[in-house]
Image: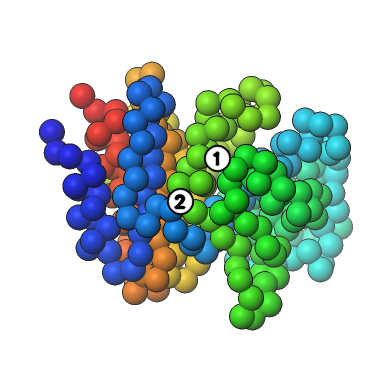
Amino acid sequence: MTDPVSTLNALVAGFSGTMGVWARSLQTDEVIQVGASDDTFPSASTIKLAIFYEVMRQAGEGRLDLSEPRELRTEDKVPGCGVLRDLSPGIRLPLRDLATLMMIISDNTASNMCIDAVGIESVNRSMDELGLTGLRLRWKFFGAPAGQPVNAAVPSQLGRLMDMIVRRQVLTPEACDEMLRVMKQVQSPYAARYLPGGSQYDRPPEGPVIAAKFGSITGCRHEVGAVWKGGRGFVFSVMTKDCKDERRVEDNEGVLAVGRAVAILYRHFLEP
């Protein structure tokens, strides 16, 4: 069997920018770390996993009501991913639905409304309490002043957050299960590209099952998630930056690199 670390090292070496890979088996606890897995990257939308965590944490403590409607205002609307930017001001959606939009289609407006509900400092404080000090939410989406540090993540720490959720080591088992239920509906995860079925919609009933959150800004393509098949699974976090391919297309070099990395991990952890 080909050594996955050697194969991943070759993938990282051939990438035009910087790449970090972190993964952990849910059965053996084997950890694979390759490339810049402990370096800081612009988080793009992967920081939404930390926001989702904080929404569920505060709801579990009774500080937030997930069923409480939140009104969409004109000033809430921001560019980028999502549908709320194109809907009429004045509509009201439960916080639960805003969090779902944030995760499934990476809706930036919904994400900012979730941030308003929980607070930036609360997100960072919760990450600190988990020992994930490299996960930093500094601004709402499209709110960072020019020249200021952006929202940030570290591949290994992002992977550890996902690992804790999958293993139900944080919050409550019910909250973790709800987070995973939502993340299994994420549209077009990069991880699906080279796995059986090839997309979130075409995979065979026997699996694999993917729960994920991707992120994308110029020069960066990321994904954090988990893959299961046949009672086995693994958690992964793959991040890229400084990619020379700046096209916003499905075959962007970063998208392909993330998909190939997850496929290598899949063959190692889940195939006989």
Identified at 51% across, 46% down, the residue is 157
Is residue 156 or residue 190 the one in the foreground?
A: 156
Task: Please provide percent x and percent y for residue 68.
Answer: 86, 40
Identified at 66% across, 46% down, the residue is 128
Q: Helix, strand or loop at disc 2? A: helix
Task: Give the CA distance from mark 1 to mark 2.
Answer: 10 Å
> Is residue 35 shown above or below 244?
above
- Label 1 belongs to which residue? 161
> Is residue 82 shown above or below 185?
below
Q: Quadrant of the C terminus?
A: top left
Identified at 49% across, 54% down, the residue is 154
Q: Amino acid at mark 1?
A: Leu
Is residue 95 or residue 40 the one in the foreground?
A: 40
Q: Farthest residue toward the bottom?
A: 146
Q: Amino acid at mark 2?
A: Pro
Task: Please provide percent x and percent y for residue 42.
Answer: 52, 64
**Residue 233 visible here:** no
For disc 1, the neighbor class at 10 Å (few under 14, some 14 to 19, many from 20) is: many
Image quarter for residue 24?
top left
> Is residue 26 shown above or below 186?
above
* Disc ID at residue 155: 2
Q: Helix, strand or loop at disc 1? A: helix
Give the mark nearer the N terminus: 1 vs 2: 2
